[in-house]
Amino acid sequence: MTAYADFYQRSIAQPEAFWKEQAGLIEWFKQPEQICDYSNPPFANWYKGGTTNLCHNAVDRHLKDRANQPAVVFVSTETNTEKTYNFRQLHTEVQCMAAILQEMGVQKGDRVLIYMPMIAEALFAMLACARIGAIHSVVFGGFASGSLASRIDDAAPRVVITADAGSRAGKIVPYTPLLKEAVALAATKPESILIIDRGLSTIDLGALRAVDYTAARQKHLNSEVPCAHLDATDISYTLYTSGTTGKPKGVQRDTGGYAVALAASMKYIFDCKPGQVYFATSDIGWVVGHSYIVYGPLIAGMTTLFYEGTPVRGMDGSADGGIWWSLVEKYKVTHMFSAPTAIRVLKKQDPAYLTKYDLSSLQALFLAGEPVDEPTARWIAAGINKPVIDNYWQTETGWPILATANGGGLSGFKPQFGSPGVPMYGYKLKLVHESTGEELKGHGEKGVVVIEGPLPPGAMQTVWGDDARFVNTYWKSIPGQMVYSTFDWGIRDANGYFTILGRTDDVINVAGHRLGTREIEESIAAHPNVAEVAVVGVADQLKGQVAMAFAVAKDASKLGDANERLKLEGEIMKLVDGNLGAVARPSRVYFVTLLPKTRSGKLLRRAIQAICEGRDTGDLATLDDPAPLLQIKELVSVK
Ligand code: ATP
Ligand code: MG
């Protein structure tokens, strides 16, 4: 056993030796000559001189020992499909996809935009790009044409890969009309479209040059396409952030550093072994999908469960809040990764689902993407009787910044409710005062979470096509020093565990008191009749800002009555008074049916705040459903 504290210390004090050792977790065509070139900060070049390939490490490498082991289990509750591909079959499919792309003219460094539902071909496409050194840019399937168009313009892809349609809770979403419209809107046009016809919807690509995947696959099924020997610093992909706080940023990632970072995280953070089964419920449109649906598990020689569907709908299309747990039983899932938003959906289901299936294979449930409130974490941990491991990170970093690492013989920090844990190896994390930049070393002091450069392997290289934006956005917000800002607000306890209090945008200032909206939300969420709540700061002439709360009631049956609403509002205010003091008390508590969220399930406080202040809501490309915002608009306009 190694004490985590020592492991961490070594990663900070001797980064070269530390990361050289981790480089041994992957296969290289040529060993790196330099572990980290940081001669031009904040740009870090990891593993310079080395050559490798993500697809080689995810697929080819495993043919020797586990060719017949399942690599991908594709499950779609939308189309009632289950299909398993072993590593040999995956190798065949990926080579075939790579050959098709090559025939379409795709070469190393070309961008390939993937606008796909969660079907196995999407994973083949990502790996095929990695194989030949093309840069993939996955755009969440079903994004509206405007958002897609701006991403096409930014990436300038030679080829777009799409499908006839996606499906969400049984509703078919035709993709081709959206893509056709997006290409018409975009200034840069792709040369051709590779289309996977699932037979769900008619294909409407107008005059765009399209290649039919089924026919092309037939032609190339026996193709052999070797893995390109890529420089460790060659770009593997670009991916946009979720757009919770504004215009999404095009995160660019390398090849070698990313492969090493993922391999190390699978070992130390997720405690995975080859042959085990990983089920991440995210989507390839998000970073969790890149790191922990596609690359991480496969690099680790695991089976990845690739899931199309919702948490509450079964194979036959009927309501089934136990579908995920039934898959855990059926496929002997060992590691599950989900988001708090999904767990809150499950919380509204019959709790009997949690004990209906044999979950003995499962080691742990990992949650990330948003703060997980303690009641929700405790509910799921007790329900499935497994460790629930919160972990905090960003699209930018590619793997956890804060977590509790107990794999690979590490020990010392157990998961704790209400905290995502401690800084992960390689991250020189600090809390600093927002306006003075002074480091806050004590515990209980609130500050901005920043990371000293160089960022560890796997983290973003730059903003695609815009080095200046990378430097100016991330490295210049703290006065007097060049550090990477997470733009999250945090606090550390006496044992070194952090809590994320929300985004720096979400800190409100009431008559000189600085409060995180999350703190207020946590105390409101403790009310037995509150299912979910969003708190925003709203400009106020007298106090600077005041808090305003939007709550979803568990039982809203009486809330049609104004007196009942007032009564509940009063109880909530009293709760906040008791927990945080009267300064934190929301000026109003409104009751809503749903909260506005991004497509990835994150609260869009920015848009709520804009509405409360009568401002324009700005870029809402990632908004999932406009109805909750309209409801809020109506509520706040009635004084
Ligand atoms: P944008 O940067 O475009 O506004 P975004 O920040 O939502 O979008 P992501 O990279 O998907 O895009 O999300 C990262 C953010 O999510 C973190 O900076 C943090 O605010 C939040 N987050 C992620 N995991 C956790 C967690 N475990 N606890 C608390 N917050 C989390
Ligand atoms: Mg962000």
Image: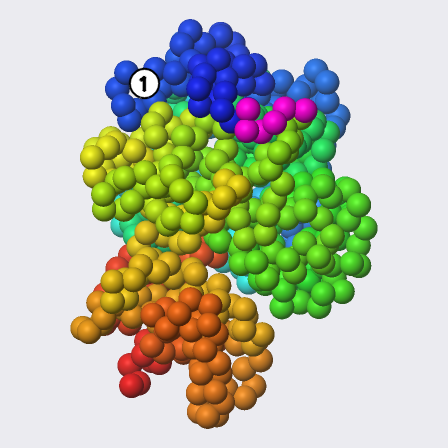
Q: Nearer the viewer, residue 360 or 15?
A: 15
Label 1 beta carbon within 8 A of ligand 1: no
* Residue 57 horizontal side relative to residue 75, left or right: left
| Residue 361 forms part of the magenta stretch | no
Question: How would you rate the neighbour count of disc 1 (Cα within 10 Å): few for under 14, some for 14-19, many for 20 or more?
Answer: some
The answer, for residue 121, to whether it is visible in the render is: no
Above or below residue 581? Residue 98 is: above
| Residue occupying image coordinates x 42% and y 73% | 577
- The residue labelled by disc 1 is 38
Colour scheme in the image?
rainbow
* Residue 234 occupies quadrant: top left
| Residue occupying image coordinates x 54% and y 53% | 418
Residue stretch rendered in magenta on the structure: 1-6
Q: Amino acid at mark 1?
A: Tyr
* Residue 428 occupies quadrant: top left
Question: What is the x, y in percent for residue 543?
Answer: 23, 70
Question: What is the x, y in percent for residue 301?
Answer: 66, 26
Q: Nearer the viewer, residue 407 or 189?
A: 407
Q: Nearer the viewer, residue 333 or 433?
A: 433
> What secondary structure is marked by label 1?
strand
Above or below residue 51? Residue 587 is: below
Question: What is the x, y in percent for residue 505?
Answer: 30, 55
Above or below residue 6? Residue 613 is: below
* Residue 275 occupies quadrant: top right
* Residue 75 horizontal side relative to residue 571, left or right: right
The answer, for residue 544, to whether it is visible in the render is: yes
